[in-house]
Image: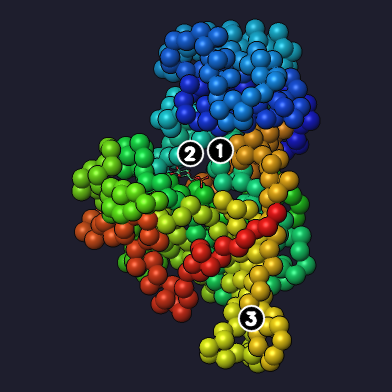
Amino acid sequence: MKQQENMSSLIMIFGATGDLAIRKLFPSLYRLFERGRLNKFAVIGVARRQITNDAFQKSVRESVINALGDKENIDEFISYFYYQSHDVTNSSSYVALRNLADQIDANYSLEGNRIFYLAMAPEFFGPIALHLKSDGLTEVKGFKRLVIEKPFGKSLESAKELNQQIRTAFSEEEIYRIDHYLGKEMVRNIEVIRFANAIFEPLWNNRYISNIQITSSEVLGVEERGRYYETSGALRDMVQNHIMQMVALLAMEPPIRLTTDEVRSEKVRVFRSLRRFESSEIKDYFVRGQYGPGTVNDEQVPEYRAEPMVDKESNTETFVAGKIMIDNFRWAGVPFYIRTGKRMKSKSTKIVVQFKDIPMNLYYQPEKNVHPNLLVIHIQPEEGITLHLNAKKAGGHLDAQEVKLSFANTGIQAMNTPEGYEKLLYDCLRGDATNFTHWDEVAYSWAFVDKISEVWEKTKTVDFPNYESGTIGPKAADELLEKDGFFWWPVSYLEVDMCK
Ligand code: BG6
């Protein structure tokens, strides 16, 4: 799709009094405004609560100041914000919203361009989309785009149903399904590292890579989200979307061009090549965990089953580790190990590409290991790349030692590194859907994950809780790699002092 430079738009945020809007969307919109990237715009905040425009503008002001500090032009910024109290199931509410939208559109000359951002519970996505169409809000002269947050369904079947509902009002090109990992600077960097470097692309295959490891660990527990998390678990919450997206970016073929369609179609080809496991094989490829009590940052924390809104005998996994196989020419035989969990030792997302050993190592001595070459992509909290090489130890004999070459995406740049949401909103305004997930990607990754959850839901007799809070997860996750002769590279070993 052609991207627009003319970005005038009326942005309607459903769920405008909620957490996402307050913590992420308003500050991100402000930053776009501050950079002159929002030239002609207005925002209608939509939510159930009865509040005045003034009260709404005040909440936008507070959200920006809390996130970014005092801002001189904040009064001007909030003057673009309007509020409409709304009942998502009631047509007359939509008619009132349409009248307000038409009026604001005319006042600000927004050329009938509309973005509908659904920052609310997923059960409302379908009904809202249907009303937007039936009550005339999508009949516009300009573009119309629907932005939706995850979760996009909770299985392939429910995702299909949801998709059918929103497709009655919006075409696939008009739907922007957010995966906030695709807004992260270093996730976006994966393609550039791979396809802009002559030294990596020729090695990026099963002849030279022995395995790839993706770890996304969190320190926080489930917090107040017990009700949602009980129906989701780590598999649906993190693997189906964020982790699978990183796998696709790491494994895809170079796209012919960097257009939305080309990039997405290469990612879809990865999903199509995922090895499908028989139910009886799942246990050999995937392990699950649930946190018990433990100590995190010197504080005692409760087990998952004692968290609010969580079943005392919950079988929900808060940790997943798995071995994903991509059965295509490039990747046959190379395991992609993934793991993610809550209440782990550190908050960290890293990708480790482990290269195969050289055919004969002249320098190897058991007590002076020569290490495999690693390419580490630090997604967060630090952002950068480290290349682990072997070089001669200074002085003396021809002993090899490991050296780490690092690029840190920090320092002056970091201050300007836009938050994920800012980038995603900007992409949406420009009509660039590359970093949003296409329906085909969603469907394939649900099909993959459904198979695992089906088995897990049937077998409730696992030894939960099976890892202590504040640790790196259950033992079974280590055994998964040990069987193949590998081990997880410890996060502490991969950390480098990313000097600025
Ligand atoms: C969200 C999950 O999608 O991603 C949360 O619903 C998780 O459970 C979060 O905490 C992690 O995102 P980040 O950007 O903090 O790694």
How many numbered marks does the figure carry? 3
Numbered tag placed on residue 281 in the rendering: none
Locate residue 143 relative to residue 86 in the image: left or right: right
Q: Nearer the viewer, residue 243 or 407?
A: 407
The answer to whether residue 351 is left or right of residue 223 is right
Q: SS at mark 3?
A: strand
- Residue 401's label in the rendered image is 3
Element at label 1: strand
Q: Percent from the top left, x then y, of residue 371?
A: 59, 79
Mark 2 CB near ligand 1 (8 Å cut): yes
Residue 326 in view in this figure: no
Q: Position of residue 213 (x, y in %)?
A: 52, 65
- Looking at the rendered image, the disc whose residue lies closer to the viewer, 3 or 2, is 3
Q: Name the residue at 40% across, 61% down.
A: 472
Residue 370 rendering spot, x and y as whole percentages: 60, 83
Name the quarter where the C terminus is drawn.
bottom right
Residue of label 2: 150
Q: Is residue 50 visible?
A: yes
Residue indicated by mark 1: 177
